[in-house]
Structure formats: C-alpha cells, structure tokens
C-alpha cells in the first residue's frame, strides 16, 4: 500500500482507503460480522483511513468502526460527516446547536473524545456563502471536539467555493472514469492550496467492477434499486448518475483495455490514482474479498498514455454528453 499526504493535516493516508456507507445501510443486507471482516481485511492490507457518516445506518457504520478500533493496535484515521440528519436540507439547519449535537452523537458512536475529520455532508450550495458555518467548525476545533474539517460536495462549483475557506482541509467529491470533470478546474486549485481530495464512488456504485449485467437485480433497500432516478437523494450518487445501459456499454469498452492479470476494479481505481491531486480513493467494500481486490490497485503499475487516452475517448463519446456539465 502506498500513502499520500492528506492536505495540510500532516497525516499520510493509504491511497486506497475504505468507504463505510455500504456496511451501514442502503446497499441491501450486509451482516455486521461480514462488515467487520471487511474492515479487518482493509487494515491488514495497509488501509489507515476510513470514511463514514453519522447517517450510514443511523450510526451503525460508525459503531462498527469503533468496534474495529478497539480490536486493532494500528493507527486508524476516521473521517465522518454531519448534516444529513436534517429532515430537509437548509442552510439554517447548519446551526451551532445542530452541529454540536451531531458531533456529540458521532463522538459517542465512535467511542472517542475527538473526531479526526468531520465533513459537511453535501450541504446546500448556498452554505458556501455563509462564513459563519465555517466559524462554528473553527470553534469546534478550538474546543477539541474535532481535529480537522472538510466538506463533501456534489458539484465542482461547490468544491471551488469551499476551498476559499482557509481551514477546509479536505474535499470529498465523486471522481471516477465516468465522472471526470473534477480533474479539469478543481484539481489544480486544490493542489495549489494543499487541500486533500477524497475520490468517492470510485467504482460508480459497483458498475466499474465489470460484474453488473443488464438484468442484475438489487434488493429493495439498495439505492441502486430505489434511487436509480434520484428518487431519494442526488441521482449522481447512484452509478454516478450515468444511465444504466449506457454505463454497461462503456464498461464493455473499458474491459477491452484491461492489462493482463488485473481486475476491472483495480483498473478503475488505478485510473483514479493516476491523478496526483487525489489523496485517496475510498471504495466501498462489503466483504474481505472485495477489499483485498480493491487494495491491490495500489500495487498496479501506472497506466500508460495510450490507455489513459482510450479511457478519455470512451468518456468523451459515451458519458460526457450525458453528465459532464451536470455536476
Ligand atoms: N454524499 C457523500 O458524502 C457520499 C456519497 C456516496 C458515497 N460516499 C462515500 O464514498 C464511499 C464509496 O462510494 P460508494 O460505496 O457509494 O460506491 P463505490 O465505492 O463506487 O461502490 C461500492 C460497491 O461496489 C461493490 N464492490 C466494491 N468493490 C468490489 C469489488 N472489488 N468487486 C466487486 N464488487 C465490488 C460493492 O457492492 P455490491 O457487492 O453490492 O455490488 C460495494 O458496496 C462510500 O462508502 C462512502 O464512504 C459519500
């Protein structure tokens, strides 16, 4: 496993880290035993950074991570999120009282006195015009409740606005072979300001693993079933907002580029790691086999120029017209 600096925090984190949404909820049934096995496999593979949120299974994901931390001696850095407990997303909802309450809940779930990194969880765009919210986060740092803070955003424009605030250490954004726009304008700016970038949904909700078929079925409580068209939350979080059939066609073209001896997941993750502005990819993993497969991406040699150009071409032809300006 290779490690990269996380913004200006002084931490070096595994370039393949772990996204803990699926082990909380909204991805069909996952047993806690299997989730803990997946988490342990991540640590065994050199992962030292986990991304979770208070709302993933209403604290279940955070509590599993607390359990993991108790049983391991390695340093494990945990990024959580706050804001999605609001019944409706409003800027006013990001009040001091609410933020303090959410942080206290996460401290409790994670069994700790200080949270390593708290990310605002895709707040409304207008929030980036409200310096007072970032002032509250500064106060929480001073009070010792959180070490660092960052944001998780839906849109490139939000990411650009967020890093104007000097103490924003990280930006989490969707970035993968099907979501390339962040690399255009945002990555150079983030690099210049030494802001860490967490590439989320790196496998396009599993589509880039190459295992999905036109007739694949998803459980009722899996967002790939209930949010296919953005019914519950931003459609970009499900298959990166790419039409399912078009996505499968593009995946077949990507498969033709696969070098011998590596999996499609490793290939998709290695593509992300080609961008040095990225701190880490945070693939979700539901079991040890998936985690082992994903972590192996850190050992895959750099993709050559021809391969990068081919992926760009597939994106430009099939995906760009559908999604590029949307986020
Ligand atoms: N708003 C936000 O801030 C936000 C939103 C979304 C995600 N996130 C974060 O980003 C993380 C990653 O995104 P994501 O979990 O949505 O999507 P993802 O990482 O693109 O896809 C994860 C899913 O793909 C499948 N998978 C993973 N590795 C595999 C492998 N090697 N072989 C076969 N299948 C594999 C698993 O589901 P199946 O086995 O069921 O196919 C897994 O749950 C999340 O866990 C979360 O921490 C944050």
Image: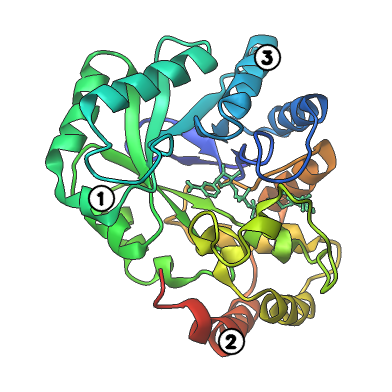
Among the 4 quarters of the image, the one containing residue 45: top right
* Residue sitting at x 26%, y 36%: 94
Which label is found at residue 276?
Answer: none
Q: Please say if 142 is above or below 265.
A: above
Q: Which residue is mark 2?
A: 313
Q: Is ligand 1 within 8 Å of the beta carbon of the residue shown at mark 1?
A: no
Q: Mark 3 or mark 1, which is nearer the start of the sequence?
A: 3
Q: Position of residue 1 (x, y in %)?
A: 66, 40
Residue tagged by mark 1? Answer: 162
| Badge 1 element | helix
- Contact (Cβ within 8 Å) of mark 3 with mark 2: no
Residue shown at 26%/59% (left/top)?
160
Disc 2/disc 1 C-alpha distance (Å): 31 Å
In the image, residue 54 lies at what x, y percent? 49, 29
Question: Dot 3, how many residues are within 10 Å of its Cα: few (below 14), some (14-19), or many (20+)?
Answer: few
Closer to the N terminus: mark 3 or mark 2?
A: 3
| SS at mark 3 in the image | loop
- Residue on which disc 3 sits: 72
User: Considering only order in the chain, which callout, 1 or 2, is on the residue closer to the N terminus?
Assistant: 1
Q: In the image, is 135 to the left or to the right of 210?
A: left
Mark 1 surroundings within 10 Å by alpha-carbon count, few (fewer than 14), some (14 through 19), many (20 or more)? many
Q: Is residue 78 shown to the viewer in this render?
A: yes
Q: What residue is shown at x 61% (from left), y 45% (from top)?
A: 16
Q: Are marks 2 and 1 in contact (CB under 8 Å)?
A: no
In this rendering, would 298 be left or right of 15? right
Left or right: 215 in relation to 271: right
């Amino acid at each position: 496993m290779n490690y990269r600096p996380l913004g200006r925090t002084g931490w070096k984190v595994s370039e393949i880290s772990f996204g803990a949404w699926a082990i909380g909820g909204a991805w069909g049934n996952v047993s806690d035993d299997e989730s803990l096995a997946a988490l342990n496999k991540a640590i065994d593979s050199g992962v030292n950074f986990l991304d979770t949120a208070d709302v993933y299974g209403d604290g279940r994901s955070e509590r599993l991570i607390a359990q993991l931390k108790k049983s391991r001696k390695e340093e494990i850095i945990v990024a959580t999120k706050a804001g999605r407990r609001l019944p409706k997303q409003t800027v006013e909802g990001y009040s001091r009282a609410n933020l303090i309450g959410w942080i206290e809940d996460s401290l409790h779930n994670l069994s700790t006195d200080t949270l390593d990194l708290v990310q605002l969880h895709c707040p409304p765009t207008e929030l980036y015009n409200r310096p007072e919210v970032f002032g509250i986060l500064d106060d929480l740092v001073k009070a010792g409740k959180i070490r660092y803070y960052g944001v998780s955003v839906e849109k490139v424009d939000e990411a650009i606005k967020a890093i104007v605030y000097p103490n924003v250490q990280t930006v989490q954004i969707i970035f993968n072979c099907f979501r390339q726009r962040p690399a255009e304008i945002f990555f150079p700016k983030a690099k210049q300001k030494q802001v860490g970038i967490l590439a989320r949904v790196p496998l396009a909700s599993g589509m880039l693993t190459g295992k999905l078929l036109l007739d694949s079925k998803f459980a009722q409580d899996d967002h790939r079933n209930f949010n296919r068209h953005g019914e519950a939350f931003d459609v970009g979080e499900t298959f990166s907002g790419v039409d399912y059939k078009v996505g499968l066609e593009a995946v077949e073209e990507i498969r033709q580029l696969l070098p011998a001896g590596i999996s499609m997941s490793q290939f998709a993750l290695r593509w992300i790691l080609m961008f040095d502005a990225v701190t880490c990819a945070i693939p979700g993993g539901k079991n040890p086999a998936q985690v082992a497969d994903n972590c192996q991406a850190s050992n895959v040699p750099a993709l050559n120029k021809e391969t990068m150009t081919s992926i760009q071409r597939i994106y430009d032809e099939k995906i760009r017209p559908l999604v590029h300006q949307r986020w």
